[in-house]
Amino acid sequence: MADYAVVDPATGETLTTFPTITDDELARAIGRAHAAHAPWSRETALADRAAAIRRVGELHVARREDLARIIVREMGKPIEQALGEVDFSAAIYEYYADNAERFLADEPIELLEGEGSAVIRRTSMGVLLGIMPWNFPYYQVARFAGPNLIIGNTILLKHAPQCPESAAAMEAMFHEAGVPADAYINIYATNEQVATVIADPRVQGVSLTGSGRAGAAVAEIAGRHLKKVVLELGGSDPFIVLGASDLDTVVQAAVDARLDNTGQSCNAAKRFVVIDELYDDFVAKFTAALTAVEPGDPTTEDAAIGPLSSSTAADRLDAQVQAALDHGATLLAGGGRKGNFFNTAVLGDIAKGNPAYGEEFFGPVAQVYKVSSEDEAIAVANDTPYGLGSYVFTDDPAQAERVADRIEAGMVYVNIVGADGVELPFGGVKASGFGRELGRYGADEFVNKKLIRTGA
């Protein structure tokens, strides 16, 4: 099979293939992006760069149905969620266009002594490499490319091998919107070629969203060549239930938090940590509600979850569940698969020595843990290599504040799920990576914060 191919995960049919870039073509692409940096960043006004990115968002809206259908066949996202992803991506481009002048304004520094002035001026760095995952094909590109193109950086975009059609569609929209052809270049590159790109002295930084293994490999190469890196590497987010005057509402929030994108979201709730006095009722309601959701044809409007993204993804999750059971876990409800369609499932009795205890499950499988105190809930929540997102449900505002403060994660959501926003920074700690995307902080990663100190 070709490195870049659209393989419908619902049927396993290979729909189309795309040729991998040659080494000569890649070398020319790096050179083109490098040559485009100066005119894009210095000769193109900020307002014009922002206008081009605003237009990218408008094209997403205009073509939302076609764009959504592309990723349904690429990675199996249910059509209504695919439409939502396109809309959210459009909002990201609009947000950065709206706030570009404010984000890039000079920042005065109050001098402690001496006369004159000092300011921080944010300027572009140069060519950036984006390595994007398959689970949110448009959204991931938007939060990386949108702000960085407005800043004046130029982009080499290497998308996931199963997302070549959406990658091509985005490149076409950037160019149609007014971003120069050499300022945003889609590259169908191999992993070996990516290493060459990172090592190239003309490339100033790299942003990757993906697995820990991929992140470590990229960071190692970038470190050897002194390149700035932003990494978002997934998570095993805890969903802590310490109090619930309306348990049904909390259970529905738990189901929603586990099943977004068929459970294939880095910041989906994956481990449900429940205080003992609520545990039995929560598990009874949660297992019933979760297993009531069945995988369906992702092209239909009523599909809540679809197939997993590929046979590789389904095989991996299947093996993880079996290993968990082999090491003493209990299948409390659900389970099984048909092809790449994976049934919802709930696992319990997961001891610390079980491999499932420290793994990320990328699919519609939940883990439940009983705890006897707030302190134990925090200890279980933090006992993971990851630190991306987290969820806390309680009726006690003081408890919510205490627990949120002690959770080792980049994001904590209290009594709410599905609350991501274009203005809210996204990122984690520990094995979930470093750096932030979205919001003000997402526009501050790949900039030269240049000090300009002027005498009287």
Image (cartoon, helix red, strand yellow):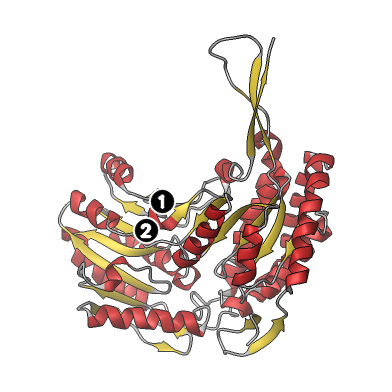
Residue nearest the viewer, comparing 456 with 52: 456
Where, by quadrant of the figure, is residue 353 drawn?
A: bottom left
| Numbered mark located on residue 429 in the image | 1
| Residue plotted at (41% across, 80% down) | 316
Residue nearest the viewer, comparing 44 with 400: 44
| Numbered mark located on residue 132 in the image | none
Residue 194 % position (x, y): 62, 66
Q: Is residue 403 above or below residue 165?
A: above
| Residue reaching furthest to the front | 224
Q: Residues within 10 Å of mark 1 (few under 14, many from 20)?
A: many
Report the amino acid beneath label 2: Tyr
Residue 438 % position (x, y): 57, 49
Q: Residues within 10 Å of mark 2 (few under 14, many from 20)?
A: many
Report the amino acid beneath label 1: Val
| Residue plotted at (32% across, 80% down) | 321
Where, by quadrant of the figure, is residue 363 drawn?
A: bottom left
What residue is pinned by disc 2?
Answer: 386
Count of labels shown?
Answer: 2
The C terminus appears in which quarter of the rendering? top right
Numbered disc 1: secondary structure? loop
Numbered disc 2: secondary structure? loop
Residue 325 % position (x, y): 25, 81
Q: Is residue 72 above or below residue 118?
A: below
Where, by quadrant of the figure, is residue 366 drawn?
A: bottom left
Point out the tag, 1 or 2, that comes first from the N-terminus. 2
| Residue plotted at (77% across, 43% down) | 41
